[in-house]
Structures are given as C-alpha cells and as structure tokens.
Image (spheres, rainbow, N blue to C red):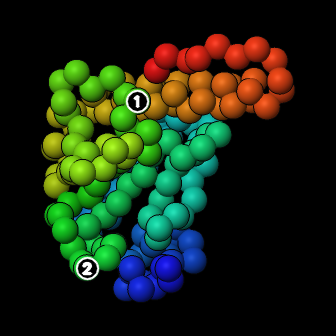
Amino acid sequence: MNLMRMQRVSFSSVEEFMQYLPDNELVLVEYLRHLIYECLPDCTEHLSYNVPYFRRYSNICFIWPASVTWGRGKSYEGVRFGFTSGYLLRDEIHYLDHGDRKQVYWKDFHSLKEIDTDIDILKMYLFEAAQIDERKFRDKRLSRSGRPQYISRF
C-alpha cells in the first residue's frame, strides 16, 4: 500500500514536519518532545507514518497531530501522544485510550494546561515504557543466544 494513498502529505525530516503544523498543534508537539527527551534522554527520534516516533531499542512512543491525517481524514482533534506497546503498561486508572487497537494506547491533548495537569502521569508512563522496551530487547537477545530464557512479566 502506497503511503501517499493513506496520507495527503509526506515529510522528509522532522523539521519539515514541524513547519507544516498549525501553531496550536506545534506548541503541544514541542512540549511533548521536550518531555520525552527529559524522561528518555538517550532515545532517538525518527519519522514513521509521517509523524515522530521515539525509540531506544524499538519504538516506544509517538506524537501524532490531528492535522497529519491517515486514511479518510481527520478523526480527532489536538495532538495524540501514544505508546506503541501501550497494552503492556500498567494502566489501572484507565487513563489511556485504545479504541479498537490491541497494542497501541494513547492520550489526546488539546492544550498545554491538560499536559501540565497530567505531567506526572505522563512521566510515569514514559519511564515504564522505557523499562518495557529494555526488557523486550533483553529477552529477544537472550532468545537469540540460545541460552535459557525466562519469560518476562510486564
């Protein structure tokens, strides 16, 4: 499937992506990027599906503004902050949404005030997501080495 069939724009860099955003989304994206780098200073950022994903060993989280549509068009407002392995996060308070998705969980934000109000919760999820990424990497490395492997409990 051609990416351009699913999306109306295509970015060659994060900078180009940032220049495309309307001001109301740009301020949220910049704030969330800062939060991610504060919590996960050794992560790297890359574009996937035309939006920034952050990884260490594998994709950990992403920032998806509503103006970067997928498929039929805009399906939400604001900026979506998502976790690629969200189903493994402890979310006893049901803070994150997942719609009909099985693995990806997210939270939509419309203002800096919403993010600031939930900053400690977001940090907790980021730290836990990084731990999950580390465990998945370690378990995968052990399984490739042929050594006995224990099953990690997330």
- Between 40 and 131, the one nearer to me in the picture: 131
Residue 61 location in percent, x, y?
44, 45
Is residue 1 rendered to the left or right of residue 87? right
- The residue drawn where x is 36% and y is 35% is 87
Decide if residue 34 is in sight here.
no
Q: Position of residue 101 (x, y in %)?
A: 30, 50
Vertical arrangement, residue 2 with respect to residue 51, above or below: below
Secondary structure under the numbered disc 2 in the rendered image:
loop
The residue shown at (65%, 40%) is 57
In the picture, measured across the screen, residue 23 lies left or right of residue 149, that is left
Image side of residue 69 versus residue 53, left or right: left
Q: Secondary structure at mark 1?
A: helix
Q: Are marks 1 and 2 in contact (CB under 8 Å)?
A: no
Q: Residue at x 27, y 32 (%)?
A: 119
Q: Residue type at mark 2?
A: Arg
Classed neighbour count for the residue bearing mark 1: other residues with Cα under 10 Å, few (<14), some (14–19), many (≥20): some
- Residue 103 is drawn in which quadrant? top left
Q: Which residue corresponds to mark 2?
A: 72
Separation of marks 1 and 2 at Cα, in angstroms: 29 Å
Q: Is residue 80 above or below residue 83?
A: below
| Residue named by callout 1 | 88
Q: Amino acid at mark 1?
A: Leu
Q: Give above or below for 57 relative to 23.
A: above
